[in-house]
Amino acid sequence: MKTQKYVINPVSGRKVLAKGRVGKQVLKGGRDQLPQSHTQYHNEDLRLTNLSYKTFDNRDLSHANLDSKNLTGAFFQGADLRDASLKKAILNNATLYDAHLERANLTGADLYGAKLHRAHLEGAILKDAQLHNAELQGADLRDADLRGAILQGAKLQGAKLQGAKLQGANLTLADLYNATFENTSYNMKTRWPVGFNPESVEELRSTDNQGPNQQGGSKNKKSKSKSKSKSKSSSNSKSKSSSKK
């Protein structure tokens, strides 16, 4: 009786016959040659830590918890990731064309080289996210939180950045051609591409002079004026009482 030889499929983590089509490709050199049909999404996949190179195209993953998952090279074209949690997820070179990521939490996520053409990122949280060389052409980043994000070399041509928070973001070498701004905030820690002057763009708003100290100062001024008026009234009352005597 012949014994069957099995190998582990590096994408699915399952045993496959070494003589089979997938097994032969695994033995030849790896996941890059695996047919797409063997990397399709299954419900149980979300429990795995390593979801690299899996395909989630056009899938409903809204509200999914994908924190700290390895999604390197994964495919999310047209996927619904609205309100999903992807904190510290690894999305290096992932494909997210036209994906819906409205209000998704991508705090500290690694999106190095990710393909986010026309992605919907309205209200997404991208604080301290790594977006080095990310492709964000035509992406909708309105009201997105990009504070502390690394956007070095990012391609932001035609991106919508109205209402986005860019305090502390690093945009050196980024391409902002035809990107649109309106009430987009930044501060002195924001780093811009060479030759880009944020003060010359009316739609950009610096928050350096809008801290709590300034607000507190206005409150102090009001309190001082109140105390002055009180002291004046008290002195007037004293003078009136003395005149009566």
Image (cartoon, rainbow, N blue to C red):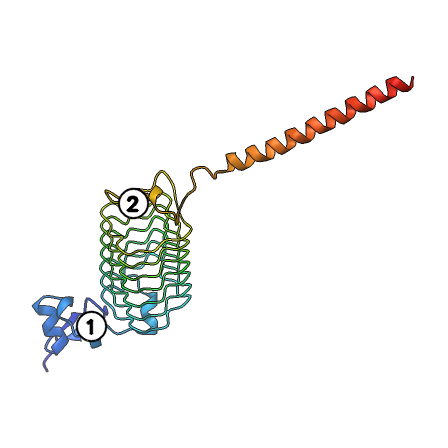
Front one among 86 and 195: 195
* Numbered tag placed on residue 191 in the rendering: none
Q: Please tell me whether residue 3 is drawn above or below residue 208 in the rendered image.
A: below
Q: Secondary structure at mark 2?
A: loop
Corner quadrant of residue 42? bottom left
Does residue 4 show up?
no
Quadrant in which the N terminus is drawn: bottom left
Q: Residue furthest right?
A: 245
Does residue 244 show up?
yes
Q: Position of residue 22 (x, y in %)?
A: 14, 75
Q: Residue at x 66, y 30 (%)?
A: 225
Quadrant in which the C terminus is drawn: top right
- Judged by depth in the image, the label closer to the viewer, 1 or 2, is 2
Query: Which residue in the structure is indicated by mark 2?
Result: 170
Q: Position of residue 184 (x, y in %)?
A: 40, 50
Q: Position of residue 171 (x, y in %)?
A: 28, 47
First in sequence: mark 1 or mark 2?
1
| Residue type, mark 1 in image | Lys
Number of numbered labels in the structure image:
2
Q: Residues within 10 Å of mark 1 (few under 14, many from 20)?
A: few
Query: Which residue in the structure is indicated by mark 1?
Result: 15
Q: Secondary structure at mark 1?
A: strand
| Residue type, mark 2 in image | Asn
Q: Position of residue 103 (x, y in %)?
A: 42, 60
Front one among 32 and 146: 146
Q: Residues within 10 Å of mark 2 (few under 14, many from 20)?
A: many
Front one among 226 and 31: 226
Corner quadrant of residue 98? bottom left
